[in-house]
Amino acid sequence: MIIAIANQKGGVGKTTTAINLAAAFSLRGQRTLLVDLDPQANSTMSYVDVATVERSVYEAITDPAVAIQDIVRPSSQPNLWVAPSRIALAKLEGKLSGELDSHFRLKDKLAPIAKDYEAIVIDCPPALGLLTVNALVAATHLLIPIQSSYFALEGTDDLLETIEKVRMRANTNLRILGVVITMHDKRTALAKDIRAQIDKVFGKKVFKTVITKSVRLEESPAYKESIFKFAPESSGATEYYRLCEEVLDRV
Ligand code: ATP
Ligand code: MG
């Protein structure tokens, strides 16, 4: 199972979902690889000291001599490994322009190691460019985080269009696993309205588990720990664990 976490809208909870969902898989004893495809390297920073990253997904994708296993690093958590990003990834589009296989680079690199992991989670950047397309082509499943905000659904048409394009040729097996609502504030009437809007568009695809706003979730990456280690009793820990169970029910 290779799950891409994508939404081209910035700051909607992609990275928070990727790092904690990956941690939840690993807690359940599944060998898990977190692939950071965002040049901002936020997922990487959550588990690895970026100053020590010399080779990243960029090298693996652009250099035929570099395998994913050459760049993979252990995290502080058992069963969890990270394929780190570096700012160099921002150059990928230019570097691969004109290459006929540019959309398939990540898929081809993951193919030989896909069996070594029970779960691979890919954190995407906030854009629908070549990096996100590489993730959608490599993935078996897609998970879309949507922030509980007034502009929640802005841009989802473009995202769905890109998914359809990928499904037509490059990855006919890609399945939309579901939509997870993030940073939800149960107390407000607006949040209820937003929930209703999202349900209207995505119906059964919306996960029952909603991720509420939580300071603990915001803090945990700074301590290089998942929410399960940093604040195991917090709402964020419970919710991401439940989301993981729902995900496993759907795959
Ligand atoms: P980008 O598009 O820049 O990659 P993103 O979609 O990966 O952003 P995150 O980095 O996960 O989004 O979240 C954006 C900000 O919101 C971060 O500061 C994060 O700590 C915070 N955040 C995410 N989820 C929650 C939550 N449930 N409660 C409170 N803060 C949250
Ligand atoms: Mg991010």
Image (spheres, rainbow, N blue to C red):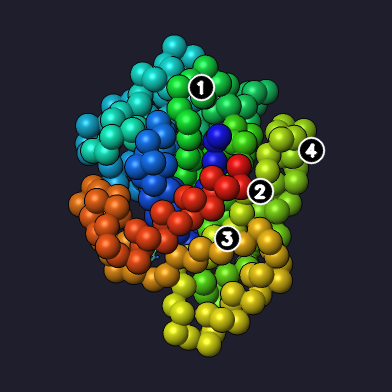
Q: Amino acid at mark 2?
A: Ile
Mark with earlier residue (1, 4): 1
Give the x, y percent position of residue 228: 29, 52
Q: Report the residue marked by disc 4.
A: 168
Mark with earlier residue (3, 1): 1
Proximity of marks 1 and 4: CB atoms separated by less than 8 Å: no
Question: Is residue 246 placed above or below 154 in the rendered structure?
Answer: above
Q: Report the residue marked by disc 2.
A: 176
The single residue placed furthest to the top in the displayed view is 65
Mark with earlier residue (2, 4): 4
Marking on residue 207: 3
- The residue nearer to you, when weighing 88 against 204, is 204
Question: Is residue 155 placed above or below 15 in the rendered structure?
Answer: below
Proximity of marks 1 and 2: CB atoms separated by less than 8 Å: no
Give the foreground label among 1 and 4: 1
| Residue sitting at x 52%, y 80% | 191
Give the SS element for disc 4. Answer: helix
Mark with earlier residue (1, 2): 1
Q: State the separation of the CA atoms marked 3 and 4.
A: 25 Å
Marking on residue 115: 1
Marking on residue 197: none
